[in-house]
Amino acid sequence: MKVMVVGGGGREHAIVKKIKENSAVTEIYALPGNGGIAQDAVCVDIAAKDLDGIAVFAKEKQIDFAVVAPDDPLVLGAVDVLEALGIPCFGPNKKAAILEGSKVFSKDLMKKYNIPTAQYAVFDDPQKAMEYLKTAPLPTVIKADGLALGKGVIIAESREEALNAVHTIMEDKVFGASGDHIVVEEFLTGPEVSVLAFTDGKTMIPMVSSMDHKRALDGDKGLNTGGMGTIAPNPYYTEALAEECMKTIFLPTMEAMNQEGRTFKGCLYFGLMLTSDGPKVIEYNCRFGDPETQVVLPLLESDLLSIMQHIAHGTLADAEVKFSKKSACCVIMASEGYPGKYESGYEITLPQHCDRIFVAGAKIKDGKLVTGGGRVLGVTEIADTLQEAIDQAYVSVQNVHFANAYYRKDIGQKALAAEV
């Protein structure tokens, strides 16, 4: 069986490694993949957003199953293009991917179907937005409507920051057309939880919960990044909360999308805030989170490809989906300076056994694996307790070497505090 995975980051490396466990798989192609993924799949130099190139390749190679992992190609309609060729896919179609592609759409959907979220206002005129922000409660959250590489959210602590955010997003167009509309949101407080869920539009099966660490520096300081590490499960997310979220958020979201004629099939990511008023949705993603995938998939005991096939065929209710009761910790090793300016091109030395090292930003140069991005790789370990998983992950980090390496030293500490 020939499988194609669209994407080229740490999330895709984790997906590729998990798919490899299925004995029916004869070939895995990653488009474009990266230098680390090249150890586990055939990397093909076709960009994730090159839908025509992806379609031609899939047809030429007679691909049996495709996994579209990143947000951009999903929002552009990669699944629609491949399904039109008769290739079964894992991932939502263009109509369903709007759940992540437009924050205005997702907020309006939640309002319409009474799904708990922060109060908000939508603007397409920068002057009106600035006028509103002169009296809005602070801090406030300002979001670009469309995709912005995970950077389109600004938490403004002061009026000046709020007005600057509007200017940057709507007038300077730092995120291009994604900033044509903005959402101004109430600032929520409480522990954050990420829950990824498998769904075929009829059945919803949440995966093990996780906790991301977005800030670049220890103590949750510094700039927001794509994620500096994760742990799973998230101790703040109790069984009682899981039941409440299923009833008030997960199933209502699935049903709302069905009602709108936008049935969602794939991985639906719920970014939640556990507020004093109960759990609320901060954001939806239409795909596996990165780096959450690097702790969630290693805990999956069932066959990932089989689950994905069941979702594509609308038979998720018949799939076996089982997760380990153990804990996982992933520490991201980045290029120093990320998410700002950084240097790359340094050789990476990995330990002999690196089953759970997921490469994100690296390439092959002169036969050697070298750094090629801000987030270079994630080191994941699994153990019986969260403390052991964290300790083992940091021991394993010491066995990975490249010049300019930087990582946070406190991944999982907030979660450990919750366990006490």
Image (tube, grey):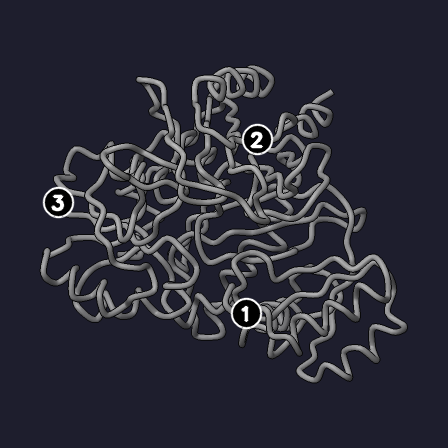
| Residue labelled with disc 1 | 146
Cα distance, mark 3 to mark 1? 36 Å
User: Percent position (x, y) of residue 162?
Assistant: 79, 66
Q: Between tags 2 and 1, which lies in front?
A: 2
User: Percent position (x, y) of residue 266?
Assistant: 38, 55
Q: Which mark is residue 1?
A: 3
- The answer to which quarter of the image holds residue 111 is bottom right
Asked whether 165 or 188 is in front, the reply is: 165
In primary-sequence order, the first of circles 2 and 3 is 3
**Above/below status of 364 relative to 224:** above
Mark 3 lies on a secondary structure that is loop
Cα distance, mark 2 to mark 3? 38 Å
Q: Residue at x 43, y 29 (%)?
A: 299
User: Percent position (x, y) of residue 252?
Assistant: 56, 60
| Residue labelled with disc 2 | 407
Report whether 31 appears left or right of 276.
left
* The furthest residue to the right: 135
**Above/below status of 180 relative to 64:** below
Quick check: marks 3 and 1 in contact, CB under 8 Å?
Answer: no
Badge 2: residue crowd in 10 Å (few <14, some 14–19, many ≥20): many
Q: Which residue is drawn at 61% across and 73% down?
A: 104
Asked whether 35 or 416 is in front, the reply is: 35
In primary-sequence order, the first of circles 2 and 1 is 1
Amino acid type for the residue under numbered disc 1: Gly
Asked whether 260 or 334 is in front, the reply is: 334
Quick check: marks 2 and 3 in contact, CB under 8 Å?
Answer: no
Asked whether 239 or 164 is in front, the reply is: 164
Mark 2 lies on a secondary structure that is loop
**Count of labels in the image:** 3
Report whether 203 appears left or right of 33.
right
